[in-house]
Image (tube, grey):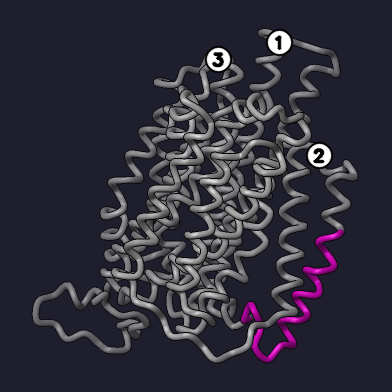
């Protein structure tokens, strides 16, 4: 049930991306205002994740989860009822706030309620499957529902959100409220800095890095982020405790996550653009190309969890990133006549397997061994890195791919086969960059991430006595 929260959050952005042309036509949005359908959600979401995670630690995680899901669900309904741009943007902003409260608390509750070892591995396997499949589910359902109306895409969240609000009080135990004060200065500076950074990245993917509409908010993000860093070093009770980064495996998982979500986000974007702009697929058909990956990541989390218990975090991350690199190398050979079944689908299978193999161990390592008082903020850091990493990857690679396409055209207007060839040249560049990011992630993970989550080998031998020093101390409890 908690994994459903992450599925809703992760699929919301991609489903609305598919519906953008329909939204523009229905509400009469200009090209400049169209980006705010996405930005009005992503800014509060990215900016408030750290605060949302810490709020769960201080106020009770189930309480914050329910508040976030209620906001998210109500805002989804308001989005579907929007009569104009201002109404739509406000509803999407509230939806982002709700998601920022709900996502870290959902992960923290799973961590708290399942003991380390196989129970937590299985629970986080389902969670990671929902997170990695969410974007693909959003594309598939968004493409299908947009045939009816873009409003149906927004309404999809409502019944599931209501279900979570009804079941969570019965199925999820509340965590104790902590008597510590909220680091208000850190909350304000961190939120302002992350929001400004998220806005700058969204502008960079549209206008490029040298345009003042990009660099002004980027520069504006530096001051609050610098203030946030100084505050967290000096504060007695910081919003983001620096002790989280002292564990080498956790710090490695954070860094690897930033790189993994960067290449994952870019590959989703450019594959969808290729099949629509070059092969002529409809939005629905573009969404359906991800159906095999969606089905795989729906049914395979149990397998990944068992592998996690057997081999540990580092082995799965290495295997997952390697699979992703192989899967990304295929689209790096794109041509104007590459076909889905023969030239894309086999490689997409590798990419889907890589995503499933990678997200579970990275999530588990990020919350492994964290003190109960810091589980929420640890989850918030992971969610924030996923948000920033995806936006950063898209902003950087879109600019580079666009430069290649422009260079191929030589500044002259083009259409038909000439335009398709120029676009494909840019797409190939994007996928080669993704391959490079995957190799970089591999080089980061190998020396940092340990075999977290692996069952001690002696436990596999009947009657063997396990050295207690080899068994990680329990930091959670079995659900009652």
Q: Secondary structure at mark 1?
A: helix
Say how many tags the image has.
3
Disc nearer the start of the sequence (2/3) = 2
Nearest to the observer: residue 231 or residue 274: 231
Q: Is residue 259 above or below residue 148?
A: below
Nearest to the observer: residue 334 or residue 223: 223
Q: Is residue 148 left or right of residue 196?
A: left
**Residue 352 is drawn in which quadrant?**
top left
Q: Main secondary structure of the magenta part?
A: helix
Task: Please name the residue that numbered disc 2 is placed on.
Answer: 208
Question: Residue 218: x and y, percent?
Answer: 82, 55
In three-dimensional space, the C-alpha distance between marks 2 and 1, rounded to whole angstroms, equals: 23 Å
Q: Residues within 10 Å of mark 1 (few under 14, many from 20)?
A: few
Placement of the C terminus among the 4 image quadrants: bottom left
Q: Is residue 100 left or right of residue 217?
A: left
Question: Residue at 68% across / 82% down in the picture?
Answer: 183
Question: Residue at 32% across / 45% down in the picture?
Answer: 298
Q: Is residue 468 above or below residue 56?
A: below
Q: Is residue 224 above or below residue 354?
A: below
Q: Which residues are magenta?
A: 220-241
Foreground: disc 3 or disc 1: 3
Please indicate, yes or no, whether residue 315 appears anywhere in the rendered image. Answer: no
The numbered dot on residue 418 is 1
State the residue lying farthest toward the top: 416
Q: Are marks 3 and 1 in contact (CB under 8 Å)?
A: no
Task: Please name the residue that numbered disc 3 is placed on.
Answer: 280
């Amino acid at each position: 049930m908690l994994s459903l929260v992450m599925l809703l959050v992760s699929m919301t952005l991609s489903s609305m991306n598919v519906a953008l042309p329909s939204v523009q036509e229905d509400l009469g949005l200009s090209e400049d205002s169209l980006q705010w359908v996405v930005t009005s959600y992503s800014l509060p979401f990215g900016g408030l994740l750290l605060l949302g995670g810490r709020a769960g630690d201080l106020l009770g995680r189930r309480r914050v989860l329910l508040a976030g899901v209620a906001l998210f669900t109500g805002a989804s309904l308001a989005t579907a009822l929007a009569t104009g741009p201002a109404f739509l943007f406000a509803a999407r902003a509230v939806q982002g706030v709700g998601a920022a409260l709900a996502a870290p608390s959902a992960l923290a509750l799973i961590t708290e309620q399942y003991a380390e070892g196989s129970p937590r591995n299985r629970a986080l396997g389902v969670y990671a499957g929902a997170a990695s499949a969410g974007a693909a589910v959003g594309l598939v359902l968004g493409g299908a529902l947009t045939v009816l109306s873009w409003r149906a895409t927004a309404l999809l969240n409502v019944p599931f959100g209501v279900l979570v609000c009804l079941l969570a009080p019965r199925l999820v135990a509340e965590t104790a409220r902590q008597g510590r004060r909220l680091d208000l200065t850190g909350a304000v500076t961190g939120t302002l800095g992350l929001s400004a950074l998220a806005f700058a990245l969204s502008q960079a993917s549209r206008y490029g890095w040298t345009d003042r509409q990009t660099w002004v908010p980027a520069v504006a993000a530096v001051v609050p982020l610098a203030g946030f860093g100084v505050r967290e070093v000096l504060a007695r009770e910081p919003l983001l405790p620096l002790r989280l980064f002292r564990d080498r495996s956790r710090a490695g998982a954070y860094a690897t996550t930033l790189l993994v979500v960067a290449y994952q986000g870019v590959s989703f974007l450019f594959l969808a653009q290729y099949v629509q702009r070059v092969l002529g697929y409809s939005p629905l058909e573009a969404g359906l190309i991800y159906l095999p990956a969606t089905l795989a990541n729906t049914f395979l989390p149990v397998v990944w969890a068992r592998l996690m218990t057997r081999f540990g975090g580092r082995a799965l991350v290495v295997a997952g990133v390697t699979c992703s690199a192989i899967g990304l190398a295929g689209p790096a050979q794109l041509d104007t006549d590459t076909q889905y079944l023969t030239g894309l689908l086999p490689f997409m299978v590798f990419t889907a397997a890589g995503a499933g193999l990678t997200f579970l161990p990275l999530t588990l390592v990020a919350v492994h061994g964290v003190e109960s008082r810091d589980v929420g903020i640890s989850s918030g850091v992971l969610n924030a890195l996923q948000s920033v990493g995806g936006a950063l990857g898209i902003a950087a690679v879109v600019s580079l791919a666009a430069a290649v396409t422009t260079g191929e055209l030589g500044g002259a207007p083009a259409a038909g086969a000439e335009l398709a060839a120029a676009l494909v040249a840019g797409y190939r560049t994007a996928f080669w960059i993704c391959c490079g990011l995957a190799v970089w992630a591999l080089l980061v993970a190998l020396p940092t991430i340990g075999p977290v989550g692996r069952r001690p080998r002696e436990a596999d031998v009947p009657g063997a006595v396990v050295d207690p020093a080899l068994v990680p101390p329990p930091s959670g409890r079995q659900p009652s």
